[in-house]
Image (tube, rainbow, N blue to C red):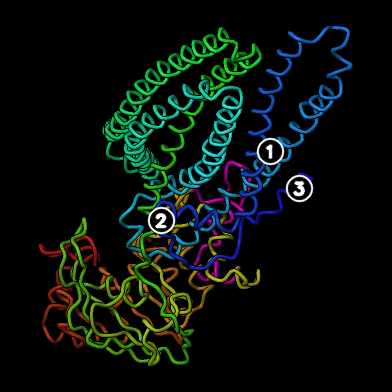
């Protein structure tokens, strides 16, 4: 039974790239809609249970009247049948309904719904552009994903449990009391009016605080995760206390929102307690007055007083539940601001698969600029009127000081950003009109800052081609000169060699080891177009020399674009393209450029220890 209910909801549906609505109700309904039959069942069962519980109070009043008016010897004969029916309601019907409601709530919704939300939103986030993740803390985005999933579930469930249950329950109370005497219902109606006014005053304020609190919590978590992710840098510069202070600032900001929430809840609680006390006094006074005039039975007074005490406890429960409800709504609103951002780079509706038969790459009058200033560079043109044709199988090197636009060109070719004007073609196909996945499948890239996944060596190398055979995997590792150190690796779980985990971002490996794993991954991918962005910068001279032959072998038959500050690593390529401020200023072979005595010759002359000296105008990104 449990398994059958648990399988009613598929937590991992096939999802498409549909942008969630930006309104609160639309956002919640977007994720609730596929499960609406289950939520409807829970709502109906909740309403039925509320009605039956109100009927129990009526039954208690009836018992009081029967006991006060029926002789003991005739009591069971007259009321025995009714008592049996109510016993079945209390012992069988109500527990059965609660059991069924719990099945759908905890087996059908409790785990499946937030997991379905996380799965769907995670797939949406993976389609976001590289710029989206550059502008956000990874830890902050992950925290929002976890928080918002639970917040949406709790918002829906509390709306059913609190709002529906209370609406049905209170309506039943008023009907029940009015049936005894309409005047006894007046205090309850007055209480409801004042209670709604209190909610209207406090809830919007609690919602604002909750939204600030959710954002402050995500910021706090993001800063903590950021420190842990960069713990090597923190310790290298002896800034543990500085990072603690940085985290403390965000913790203090979060604590301020909690204090504000606490003050509102205290005021709400005191006002509610006074209102409940007033209700108890009013109902008791009206009830006694009506009894004195013989207009009301003792049982009716008992029912009314019991319902007041029930409302007393329920209203405090509602206060906490409503506070939690709007705290969750604040969390959802904060999540909406992140999860409903449009995908900056989307495939066109008619996007085709890129097919590469030759490997020609052509930049036609390409210009690109960042629309807004970024942390490490101002807004403005990075590449301007750039035109370059790379013949199939040609190997070119991009040369220039930092900030010349070299790495930006590679990012544009990979379509991490769209060009501002002009176009880029591969074998005559405009890359903006093909699917991004098919484009990137045809390009292999090794970067300067190699980041590995927190998985095994095997998983990281197979990332290049997951369906590769064991023989192909071994061959790629050997060609990258990585087999020697892999055999000596082990992790704290006792796994060794290819089965050893590399740690977050590959921190358990040296820079050179990470680079060789990355090179093996690209060798296994064997894409027709190869990009090298400072591919051997993390290798010492001996290791670089050892794999240089294999790198050149990898280049055979491929179109290659290489970026390097160490000019000796690209001097032997077919053509060198010298860039300055996003434009081509020189191009030719190494010998031609040295003979021309231009910028390249000056850069070559400045080489000290094999590295290129950055110009005064250089910035962090190429």
Which mark is on residue 469? none
Which mark is on residue 3? 3
Quarter of the image with the N terminus is top right
The reply, left or right, for residue 95 in relation to residue 500 is right
Q: Is residue 224 visible?
A: no
Whole-number angstrom distance, CA of label 3 to CA of label 1: 14 Å
Residue 327, picture quadrant:
top left
Which numbered disc flags the more N-terminal residue, 3 or 2?
Answer: 3
**Mark 2 highlights which residue?**
339
**Mark 1 highlights which residue?**
102
Q: Position of residue 106 (x, y in %)?
A: 66, 40
What span is in magenta?
475-503
Q: Position of residue 538 (x, y in %)?
A: 36, 60
Q: Is residue 496 visible?
A: yes
Residue ID at (66%, 14%):
299
Whole-number angstrom distance, CA of label 1 to CA of label 2: 31 Å
Q: Position of residue 205 (x, y in %)?
A: 32, 34
Within-10-Å neighbours for mark 3: few <14, some 14–19, many 20+: few
Within-10-Å neighbours for mark 2: few <14, some 14–19, many 20+: many
Q: Position of residue 116 (x, y in %)?
A: 57, 54
Q: Is residue 193 above or below residue 580?
A: above
Whole-number angstrom distance, CA of label 3 to CA of label 2: 32 Å
Q: Which SS class for mark 2?
A: helix
In the rendered structure, does residue 484 fall within the stretch colored magenta? yes
In the rendered structure, does residue 116 fall within the stretch colored magenta? no
Q: Which SS class for mark 1?
A: helix
Circle 1/circle 2 CB separation < 8 Å: no
Residue ID at (65%, 50%):
38
Q: Which SS class for mark 3?
A: helix
Q: Is residue 86 above or below residue 519?
A: above
Q: 87 or 108: which is nearer to us?
A: 87
Q: Nearer the viewer, mark 3 or mark 1?
A: 1
């Amino acid at each position: 039974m449990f398994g059958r209910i648990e399988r009613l909801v598929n937590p991992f549906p096939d999802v498409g790239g549909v942008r969630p609505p930006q309104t609160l109700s639309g956002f919640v309904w977007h994720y609730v809609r596929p499960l609406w039959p289950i939520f409807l069942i829970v709502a109906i069962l909740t309403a039925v249970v509320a009605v039956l519980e109100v009927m129990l109070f009526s039954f208690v009043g009836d018992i009081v009247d029967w006991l006060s008016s029926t002789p003991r010897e005739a009591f069971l004969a007259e009321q025995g049948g009714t008592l049996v029916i109510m016993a079945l309601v209390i012992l069988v019907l109500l527990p059965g309904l609660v059991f069924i409601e719990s099945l759908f709530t905890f087996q059908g919704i409790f785990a499946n719904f937030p997991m379905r939300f996380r799965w769907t939103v995670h797939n949406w986030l993976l389609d976001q552009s590289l710029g989206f993740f550059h502008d956000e803390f990874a830890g902050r985005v992950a925290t929002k994903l976890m928080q918002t999933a639970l917040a949406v579930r709790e918002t829906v469930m509390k709306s059913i449990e609190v709002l529906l249950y209370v609406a049905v329950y209170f309506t039943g109370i008023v009907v029940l009391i009015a049936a005894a005497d309409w005047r006894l219902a007046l205090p309850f109606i007055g209480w409801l009016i004042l209670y709604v006014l209190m909610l209207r005053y406090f809830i919007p304020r609690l919602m604002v605080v909750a939204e600030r609190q959710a954002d402050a919590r995500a910021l706090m978590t993001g800063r903590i995760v950021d420190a842990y992710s960069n713990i090597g840098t923190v310790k290298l510069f002896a800034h543990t206390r500085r990072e603690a202070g940085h985290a403390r600032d965000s913790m203090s900001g979060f604590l301020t929102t909690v204090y504000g929430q606490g003050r509102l809840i205290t005021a709400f609680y005191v006002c509610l307690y006074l209102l409940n006390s007033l209700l108890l006094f009013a109902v008791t006074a009206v009830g006694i007055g009506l009894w004195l005039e013989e207009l009301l039975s003792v049982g009716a007074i008992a029912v009314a007083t019991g319902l007041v005490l029930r409302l007393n406890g329920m209203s405090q429960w509602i206060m906490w539940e409503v506070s939690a409800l709007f705290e969750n709504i604040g969390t959802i609103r904060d999540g909406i601001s992140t999860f409903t951002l449009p995908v900056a780079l989307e495939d066109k509706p008619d996007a085709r698969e890129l097919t590469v038969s030759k490997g020609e790459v052509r930049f036609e009058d390409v210009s690109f600029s960042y629309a807004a200033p970024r942390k490490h560079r101002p807004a403005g043109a990075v590449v301007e009127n750039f035109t370059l044709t790379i013949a199939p199988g040609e190997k070119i090197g991009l040369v220039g000081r930092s900030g010349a636009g070299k790495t930006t060109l590679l990012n544009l070719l990979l379509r991490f950003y769209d060009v501002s004007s002009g176009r880029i073609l591969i074998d005559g196909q405009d890359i903006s009109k093909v699917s991004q996945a098919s484009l990137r499948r045809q390009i292999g890239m090794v970067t300067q800052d190699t980041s590995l996944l927190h998985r095994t060596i095997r998983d990281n190398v197979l990332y290049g081609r997951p369906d590769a055979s064991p023989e192909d995997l071994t061959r790629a590792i050997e060609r990258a000169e990585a087999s020697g150190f892999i055999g000596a690796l082990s992790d704290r779980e006792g796994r060794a060699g290819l089965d050893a985990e590399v740690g977050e971002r590959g921190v358990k490996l040296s820079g050179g080891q990470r680079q060789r794993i990355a090179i093996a991954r690209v060798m296994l991918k064997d894409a027709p177009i190869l990009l090298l962005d400072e591919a051997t910068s993390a290798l010492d001279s001996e290791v670089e020399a050892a794999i240089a032959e294999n790198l050149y072998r990898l280049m055979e038959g491929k179109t290659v674009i290489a970026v390097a500050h160490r000019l000796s690593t690209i001097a032997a390529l077919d053509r060198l393209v010298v860039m300055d401020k996003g434009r081509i200023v020189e191009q030719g072979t190494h010998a031609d450029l040295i003979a021309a005595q231009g910028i390249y010759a000056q850069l070559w002359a400045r080489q000290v220890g094999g590295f290129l000296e950055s110009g005064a105008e250089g910035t962090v990104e190429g």
